[in-house]
Amino acid sequence: MRPDQIEVLKQGAESGDTTSKLMYGLALVQGRFVAQDLKAGLGHIRESAAGGHPEAMFFLAVYQLDQGGKSPENLELARQLLEKAAYTGHVKSQIELAKSYLSGNYWPASDEQALMWMRFAAKEGQGVAYLLLGFFFLDRGMNQDAIHMMRLAERAGEKHVAEVIQESLDGLKDEGFTEDLEGYALKVIAQTLGREAETLAGLLPELEKDPSAAAAKTLSVMHDYGYGTPINPVKSTEWLGIAADRGDAEARHFHNERKRVGYLGEGEKSQ
């Protein structure tokens, strides 16, 4: 930002533009090219958030967590702001929610919620989300899934992942672990589908034409873990619902659980 842009941002903020409100508010909060005014700055940022700007919601949530103390009211306000931003696809909010639910620092720890937000962030191709998923699975002894997620993080450009993968593999050697990601994925799919599949390639369109509940549940697993297709929690839940509608009791149970923990927000539901 340049000093001559401040007046333009101020005019935009006064006219109601949410991005201008956010940027002018941040300038006031930080005292950049304008006299610092925390109260006025936060006021502009709150107006931006009220207008639906996800970055403004994220800023206010983090500010609330850092400065507002840990009263139930402050924590609930921060959670609501982060969730509202996260459901618009705001990756930083998704990652913040995932980390918070993993650590239990602000809200009770919840694997279901942490996994949900990590997968949403992974859907956007975020390497850090794949890496978080990798550590999540590694901590729970799901080693093959952990290495798979770390490989996805590596492909997404996350730095130093190769070293983390090698350290993880070195630690698993004594268990007779071998890295055969496709073979493992096919084994998981075979257990879900009830029959063998030779390769992941071409399996998706074949299953999409299959009217069985097993096929729908398999598609849900593939979209959940990124087997032969990018991770997509929306499509995963859609196929889980189809499997439930086709009479699969286990799919119905897990689909109901996802609804119970708010797995999909209004902005993420399949149309």
Image: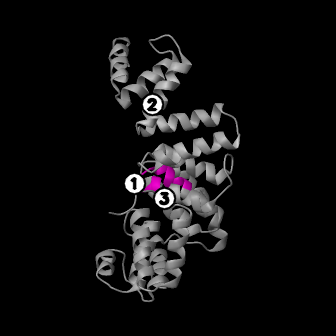
**Which quadrant is the C terminus positioned in?**
bottom left
Mark in the foreground, 2 or 1: 2
Q: Does the CB distance between marks 2 and 3 fall below 8 Å?
A: no
| Kind of residue indicated by mark 2 | Glu
Q: Identify the residue at image location x=53%, y=54%.
A: 131
| Kind of residue indicated by mark 1 | Gly
Q: Position of residue 91 (x, y in %)?
A: 45, 46
Q: Identify the residue at image location x=57%, y=53%.
A: 164
Which of the pair 161/271 is nearer the observer?
271
Which of the pair 140/247 is nearer the observer?
247
Q: Which residue is mark 3?
A: 119
Which of the 4 image quarters holds residue 102? bottom right
Q: Which residue is mark 2?
A: 47
- Whichever of labels 1 and 3 marks the residue nearer the N terminus, that label is 3
- Whichever of labels 2 and 3 marks the residue nearer the N terminus, that label is 2
In reply to whether residue 254 is colored magenta, the answer given is: no
Q: Residues within 10 Å of mark 3 (few under 14, many from 20)?
A: many
Distance (Cα) linking label 2 and label 3? 30 Å
Q: Residues within 10 Å of mark 2 (few under 14, many from 20)?
A: many
State whether residue 30 is above or below residue 203: above
Chain part drawn in magenta: 120-132
Q: Which residue is mark 1?
A: 267
Q: Identify the residue at image location x=45%, y=89%.
A: 194
State whether residue 103 is above or below residue 146: above
Q: Secondary structure at mark 3?
A: helix
- Whichever of labels 2 and 1 marks the residue nearer the N terminus, that label is 2
